[in-house]
Image: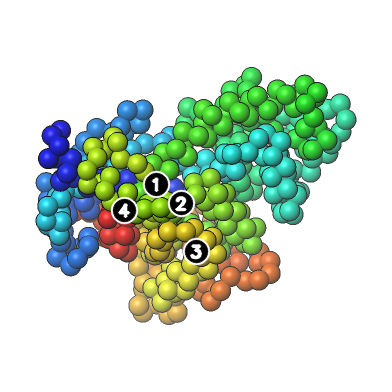
Amino acid sequence: MSWLNWLKTTEARVGVVGTANSGKTVLLTALIDHLKHHNPQRFRLGRAGTRVSLFKELPPDAGWSKFNFEAHRNGLVQSRHWPRKTADRSQFVCQFDRDDWRFNDCLLKLYDLPGERIADAAMLGRTFAEWSAHHLHRIESDAQYLAHCAEYLEAARRPGATEAELLSAYRLALARLVLSYKPLISPSAFVLDARGGCARRGTAEELAAARLSGASADAQFCPLPPERCAPGDPVFAAFAARFESYTRELVEPTLAAFRSCSALVILLDVTTVLMGGAGFYNDTQQMVGDLFDALDPGERPVFGALARRLSKTFFPHAWRPGWITRAAFVAPKADLVHPDDRDTVLRLLRDMVEPRARDCTGLTWECFNVASVCSAQERRAGGPRAMRGFLLRGPDGRVRKEPGEAEDQYTVSQPPDGWPLHHWPAHEYLFPEVFPRVPARRDYPPDHVGLDALASFVIE
């Protein structure tokens, strides 16, 4: 690549992360589809009328697997099911012209990063003893986590408890947390191992026997109470060494990929938080806090903004420094919410993230309501909050393997004007999931809500 091409190419690195089942893969698939087959009437990028042209897919960077756009889109069309969860980090690289950038084209790098790794963010910059204290405090501060981990905490405080006893009790505690849909599972290799293998369903005992609390069978560790974090304790010494190796090999590469981005997209499923109850709200907010502590987003001091802009103009891509200056918080699955309530969901998202985001000096951030694939619609003649779509779960509660011949008609909950101050039970709110609705025509991207506004914000 010549130096003239360096000068005329603006690079945007966008990392996409979110809580489990928040729709990262669907968002990336739909975004790529709209850029590849751009129609300014259906997808506004930047100024009104801007057109994307000369779209070209490029190989991913060394060490990254390719985000398989074609397979994900074909799966949505042919199997009519949502993609399986992200099992490994992947990247999609493309280049295109946009006619509102007169002298520049765009090199876009999209990073798909497993949301499970967010739970490990608290490991970065901490010793094993410090992480143990932090993690155990988090468990003991939440009644639901405490209930599932009580047997482990008892074993950890028992003098003379062996390594095998501690690991067995901790894996059982993690298994119970997984089966209760609690997201703060650390080490995250228990639910998503280093090879991308995911935890399967079963009893807590079956899950505990099948999964590992570390990168491999002989590299497992678990948090220890302060009385066991003594240099002379052989269990402490072994766990501390394994913790450092795990952090170096699994946590640091993922967070380094985040830090190299110019913008971060964080999917926080407000509908799932409402359905999950107060505990799920606390978990989600804790994960955002841990992620921001580890990434330290914002403009760098002393000519940071100027240095960043000059590097984007004059340096080849491999030399350009990366730091996160933009954060987009996304409430996905906006189509599952009645149109009259979407502004309320956006306020709930802002209320959840604003205290942390506004403390990041120089960080430009915004909240977005997005439906990457709009598959549910308002039923105008059906009464208050009536919707229609092909329900994934029927009235009997069973998950359907195929959509029905005719659309289902159903109602959704009205979200509260603000987050309740006190406990609210799980399943007090209901927002049923639906089968995806994606056009079979390969040159016609799916309908969406707000995806173009999000793209305009992060592709600068």
Cβ–Cβ under 8 Å for marks 3 and 2? no
| Residue in view at x 67 percent, y 39 percent | 131
Residue 321 shown left or right of residue 132 in the figure: left
- Within-10-Å neighbours for mark 2: few <14, some 14–19, many 20+: many
Residue placed under numbered mark 2 in the picture: 297
Cβ–Cβ under 8 Å for marks 2 and 1? yes
Q: CA distance from mark 4 to mark 1?
A: 13 Å
Disc 2 is placed on an element classified as: loop
Residue placed under numbered mark 1 in the picture: 323
Amino acid marked by disc 2: Pro
Q: x, y percentage for residue 151? A: 80, 39
Q: Earlier in the sequence, mark 2 or mark 1?
A: 2
Quadrant in the rendering for residue 407: bottom left
Amino acid marked by disc 3: Arg
Q: Residue furthest front?
A: 302
Q: CA distance from mark 2 to mark 4?
A: 17 Å
Residue 183 can be seen in this image: yes
